[in-house]
Image (cartoon, grey):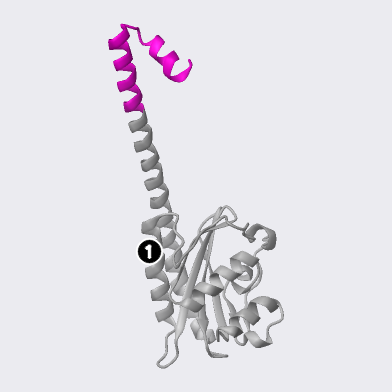
Amino acid sequence: MVEQQKKQGFRVPDRYRVRSGTTRRTEVGLIDEKTGEFLAELVTLGAECCYRPRSAVECGITVVQDGRPAMAAASGPNARVLEDLQYSSGTGPCVTALGLDGALLVQDLSMERRWPDYSAAASAINVRSILSVPLELGDTSHAVLNLYSEHSGYFTSSDAVTIASFAQIASEALKLNLVIAQLREQCDELKVAIISRTAADIAIGAIMAQHRYGREEPLKLLFGR
């Protein structure tokens, strides 16, 4: 097992527990559709990083914003199940990796004692080994890229180096994507505000024309001012 030192002063458990019903997710749980599309491409590329012939590898990622899972993507059904399980229960290698400076490599989940319920669920769907790498996204956003294999001892130290390099590039791209998503949201809110203001101006004008009011009277009628 390869595990890096924990981040100084970093505490994981309670912050990353998900309240029931706070996030509705399918294969890609969306805060922003375009960001979801980006994550779907990201997990496909991530799985290919450690692919070897006749050995299926699945990849998943969950982005946590302000302590709650905001969006997720998975390249296959097993990854999807295990991503959801970790963030609904608040425990598992992915959640543990959030507090590390580097990769968390679990060679054989059947020998792992830190997450008994998670290990049992993984075994039930034939997942034997996991490689988790945290992505640096800033102060309020975090993510972990997770690779899953049906073979014990599948991932090597070389795989950990490869996926860490991939994660570094992915984190920069994802940070930019999240900024763009935030700007899109702000733009949408501005559009709504402009439309609302336009509708209010039209209503005020109609009342002024019909009753020959000044501007103050329609404002009182419409907004109680």
Q: Which residues are magenta?
A: 197-225
What's under tag 1, amino acid-wise?
Answer: Phe
Name the residue located 39 percent from the left edge and 75 percent from the top edge. 44
**Residue 224 place in picture, x, y as percent:** 48, 17
Number of residue marks = 1
Name the residue located 53 percent from the left edge and 74 percent from the top edge. 81
Q: Quadrant of residue 43?
A: bottom left
Magenta includes 198? yes
Q: Quadrant of residue 216?
A: top left
Name the residue located 33 percent from the left edge and 32 percent from the top edge. 195
Viewer-closest of 176 and 34: 34
Q: Quarter of the image for the N terminus: give it.
A: bottom right
Residue 86 appears in the figure = yes
Q: Is residue 209 above or below residue 180?
A: above
What residue did someone put label 1 on? 38
Viewer-closest of 105 and 221: 221
- Within 10 angstroms of label 1, few (less than 14), some, or many (20 or more) residues? some
Viewer-closest of 64 and 137: 64
**Residue 45 place in picture, x, y as percent:** 39, 75
